Structure formats: C-alpha cells, structure tokens
Amino acid sequence: MINYQIIVEYLGSNYVGWQYQKNGVSIQSLVEKALSKILKSKVRISGSGRTDAGVHATGQSANFYSEKKILNKFQFLNSINFFLKETDISIIDLKKKKKDFHARHSVKKKIYKYIIMNRETHSPIFKKRSWQIKKKLNFLQMKKGIKFFLGTHNFSAMRASSCTAKSPIRTITKAHIKKKRDCIIFTFQSKSFLQKQVRSMVGCLKYVGEDKWKPEKIRFVINSKKRNLCAPPAPPDGLYLEKVFY
C-alpha cells in the first residue's frame, strides 16, 4: 500500500463541512468518491482536521492509501479535478509520503485566516467569502487586543459546546492582524484549534473594534473560562484553513 498526501482547496459555502454528516454533502465524501473512480477501488481519506459548514480552505491536507501506484502526478490531478468540476473543490497537489504519515496526527502547526469586509456597501466578490461589517472598526484597538491570544491558555471560553477535544489548552504561536483596503485580515497559528475557537476570537476582536470592549477585556474573558462571557462567534463565511505544516 502506498501512502499519498493531497492538498485540497475548497469553497465551503454549499457543504456541511469537511467530515461526513447525515444532514448534507461533505467535502470529504466528494473527494473520496472522485478518488475511488480514478483508482477503481474504495478509498477513505483522513483530513488534517474538521472544518465546519461554510468554512473554506486554500490548503487543507489529507492522506489516503492506495494499492495502485500513481505514475503521473499531473495526469492524476487533471483526472480527479475533472470529476470534481461540478463542485467547489479542487485537488491542487499530490505527494507520496512515508507509511507512518497521517494528515491529522503528524501535524506540527496550522494557519487559519479570517477576513472581515469593513465597508458600507456589499461586495459581490467577497460575498460568502468574508464577514461584512458596515460600521467602521477601530483597527488600532483590535491590533492591541489580538496580542492577548498569544501564548498557552485555557480557551474554554472560546470553544463550542459540541467541541470533543480532550483538553481546552491551546498554544497560539502567531496572532496577526493587517488591513488591506477595506479588508481586515486576521491570521492565527497553532498546532491545533478547538471547535469555533478562531471564530470566537474574531468575534471578541469585533467587539473591541466596535469599542464595546477594551482590548484588555479579552484577557479577562480567557481567564474566566466561561463561554457565556465570550462574544458571539464570527460567521463561517470569512474563515479559511490556509496551510498545514508537518
């Protein structure tokens, strides 16, 4: 059996998320279906982690085992993307890996990006690809606030009630914010994230940007470990799994 890694790009708006669910079509199911057609045998893939319904990816990582050797990478990519052409999914890379490589267990760090479109008029380009906020946000205050996420913390206040992670402790190694025209772009890096953690962090920063909270309130909310003190999570539309490192 040969172990292969694929890099998957997708627009998550029309799917129930990465992982199989009974209530709709998942990205995982469509990729497995296309792989099974190409390799002429049933294929199961393991992703680097779940992305929720509506969340996008420019660099989701997954691996699968195949008895059949893939001889021509570019022919393979063209073929599988032919079967995915009616979807919002594309396989953008293929790599042969060692047998012990696992897309989730071997992860060293992940980068998530979130985009806020901060202007009064809607953007047809960024529709379902960002969170539009019409009120002008205080960028300098948000820049102060985002620093409180750095380091190792108990993020119980910023995890979904349905989160199944064994521990709420996470280490954020990068928390960055920048402005590009009308877009405010957040970047977070960690080995792993809790369910809805990034969206909750962005929701808190939105409160800071609206001057509802002082930047220091973020530290207070983290230390409280209470979900009811956290700001409402940002919608999934602006969230992207950008890259997975091994």
Image (cartoon, grey):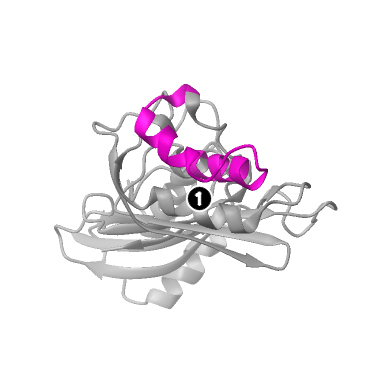
Image quarter where the C terminus lies is bottom left
Which residue: 45% across, 51% down?
A: 31
Position of residue 152 measured from the top left corner of the image (x, y, whole percent): 27, 47
Q: Does dot 1 land on a helix, a strand or a loop?
A: helix
Q: Give the side of residue 123 with respect to residue 34, left or right.
A: right
Up the image or down, 204 lies above or below 105; here it is above
Q: Position of residue 127 (x, y in %)?
A: 74, 51
Q: Quadrant of the N terminus?
A: bottom left
Please name the amino acid that badge 1 sits on. Gly
**Residue drawn at point x = 56 percent, y = 45 percent:** 205
- Side (left or right) of 62 relative to 54: left
Query: Which residue extends farthest left?
Result: 100
Mark 1 residue crowding within 10 angstroms, few (<14) / some (14–19) / many (20+) = many
Q: Which residue is disc 1 drawn over?
A: 145
Magenta-colored span: 200-228
Question: Residue at coordinates 66% horizontally, 51% vertically from top-left?
Answer: 130
Relative depth, front residue between 217 and 51: 217
Picture layout, residue 164 above or below residue 101 = above
Locate residue 94: give its quadrant.
Answer: bottom left
Q: Position of residue 147 (x, y in %)?
A: 43, 54
